[in-house]
Image: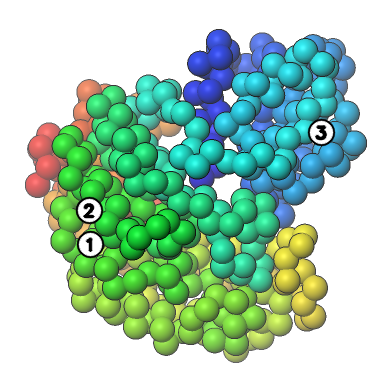
């Protein structure tokens, strides 16, 4: 979601007459789009903001702004700690950023906007203003009503607000007309899309309507909450040809006791039953997950339950997070906060096990020919292209830059836990 927010802010500023520069020394406006989900993300952002003090003393005309979740959480505290910050723009105010910048320029700031109502259908979007020509993120909904014990999203992003289907479809049609062939629908809890809209229109209906858009080749959606993933979603993935066989469905823990403390709303048994239903409907589906290691009160037995769930599901990809206390959450005041060394040791063990599983999963693909959407050259070797399979596996292969945005066939020859290497066999998909 932060990537999309940054993209929309950029488009808004370009429409207002701004030009982007490659070096910070050339900038007249510097904006940070921030996240508060983990303490590490906030610490990094605060460090970067602090590092601009000396630069702003030399260039007092420069406007520095902080946007997003950290801005929403800290508010005026940011301008008190960092007097060179002249804009604080919360999660619901970023569609107004061009006007906020104009106000800060006129008044000298600081300008603090936190409580604006986000437009029902999202900000106006210029389809051509996006970093990738062939793929795009589209927000289907914002906010969340689940209130997991560790999460700041409901308090910072607000309650769930689904966009009207016709507005989502209209935006995707414009993006496809501009060259996008892959769309990813975004939502803090995408499976509950439509529950706040009149009628019974759901995510499955939206997937079907988007699947029918001519010119679109691939459709993804993130992130799924296990308790809200209804029976129509597996059916939609199985039946709709453009919906990719990949699902990000975080368990967060393998222990029923910890899941209850987290207020996740499901059990380990339910999660495994859901995995079984998904694989029955879509045998080749790739599952991605998240785990939080070191949640307050997590015992060795609880952690081993997470380890065993990791092994049983055999995730194609896993994001493994060390628990960090977030202000204002229920977990902040829970007893039995774990020491950092215990959290780090468990995190390393889980990470090592996931790397082993990922490598085994990737090795099983050697010799197979797969459909890859070519994305562009790798950073270090421009003669090598990177792309993704429908299952979201990263594939690196030799090819010409003209293949970007096209579906090609690649035979898998070598693997690592992170990436897969192959040989281009056809410039048309399998």
Residue 380: where, in percent of width, then height? 42, 31
Between marks 1 and 2, how big is the CA–CA gap? 7 Å
As drawn, the label of residue 236 is 1
Circle 2 residue: 208
Q: Earlier in the sequence, mark 2 or mark 3?
A: 3
- Coloration mode: rainbow
| Nearer-the-camera pick, 344 or 102 | 102
Q: Position of residue 287 (x, y in %)?
A: 35, 65
For the residues labelled 2 and 3, the Cα–Cα distance comes to: 47 Å
Binning the other alpha carbons within 10 Å of mark 1 as few (below 14), some (14 to 19) or many (20 upward) gives some
Which image quarter: residue 20?
top right
Q: Is residue 138 left or right of residue 253?
A: left
For residue 223, side relative to residue 84 (left or right): left
Residue at horizontal 46 percent and vertical 59 percent from the top: 196
Compared to residue 269, the image places residue 284 above or below, namely above
Q: Residue furthest front?
A: 198
Q: Based on the displayed image, in which of its 4 quarters is residue 205 positioned?
A: bottom left
Residue 360 x/y as whole percent: 32, 67
Question: Circle 3 sits on which residue?
Answer: 50
User: Is the Cβ of the residue at disc 1 closer than 8 Å to that at disc 2?
Assistant: yes
Residue count near mark 3 (Cα–Cα under 10 Å), binned few <14, some 14–19, many ≥20: some
Judged left or right of residue 68, residue 317 is left
């Amino acid at each position: 979601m932060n990537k999309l927010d940054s993209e929309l802010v950029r488009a808004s500023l370009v429409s207002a007459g701004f030009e982007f520069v490659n070096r910070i020394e050339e900038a007249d406006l510097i904006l940070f789009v921030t996240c508060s989900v983990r303490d590490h993300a906030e610490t990094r952002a605060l460090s970067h903001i602090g590092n601009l003090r000396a630069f702003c003393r030399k260039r007092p005309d420069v406007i520095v702004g902080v946007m997003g979740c950290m801005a929403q959480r800290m508010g005026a505290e940011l301008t008190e700690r960092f007097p060179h910050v002249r804009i604080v723009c919360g999660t619901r105010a970023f569609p107004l950023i061009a006007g906020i910048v104009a106000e800060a320029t006129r008044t000298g700031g600081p300008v603090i906007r936190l409580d604006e109502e986000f437009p029902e259908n999202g900000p106006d979007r210029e389809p051509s203003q996006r970093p990738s020509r062939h793929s795009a993120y589209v927000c289907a909904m914002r906010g969340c009503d689940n209130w997991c014990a560790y999460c700041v999203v409901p308090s910072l992003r607000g309650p769930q607000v689904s966009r009207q289907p016709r507005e989502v479809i209209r935006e995707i049609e414009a993006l496809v007309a501009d060259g996008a062939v892959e769309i990813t629908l975004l939502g803090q809890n995408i499976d509950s899309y439509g529950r706040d809209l009149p009628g019974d229109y759901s995510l499955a209906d939206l997937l079907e309507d988007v699947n029918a858009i001519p010119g679109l080749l691939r459709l993804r959606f993130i992130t799924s909450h296990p308790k809200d993933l209804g029976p129509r979603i597996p059916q939609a993935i199985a039946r709709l040809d453009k919906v990719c066989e990949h699902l990000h469905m975080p368990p967060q823990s393998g222990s029923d006791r910890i899941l209850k403390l987290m207020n996740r709303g499901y059990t380990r048994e339910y999660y495994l039953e859901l995995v079984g239903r998904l694989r029955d409907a879509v045998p080749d589906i790739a599952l991605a997950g998240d785990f939080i290691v070191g949640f307050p009160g997590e015992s060795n037995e609880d952690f081993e339950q997470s380890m065993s769930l990791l092994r049983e599901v055999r995730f194609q990809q896993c994001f493994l997070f060390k628990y960090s206390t977030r202000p204002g959450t229920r977990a902040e005041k829970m007893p039995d906060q774990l020491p950092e060394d215990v959290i780090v040791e468990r995190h390393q063990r889980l990470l090592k096990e996931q790397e082993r599983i990922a490598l085994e999963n990737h090795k099983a693909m050697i010799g197979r020919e797969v459909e890859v959407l070519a994305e562009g050259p790798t950073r270090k070797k421009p003669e090598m292209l990177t792309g993704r399979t429908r299952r979201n596996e990263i594939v690196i292969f030799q090819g010409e830059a003209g293949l970007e945005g096209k579906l090609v066939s690649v035979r898998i020859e070598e693997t690592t836990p992170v990436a897969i290497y192959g040989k281009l066999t056809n410039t048309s998909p399998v």
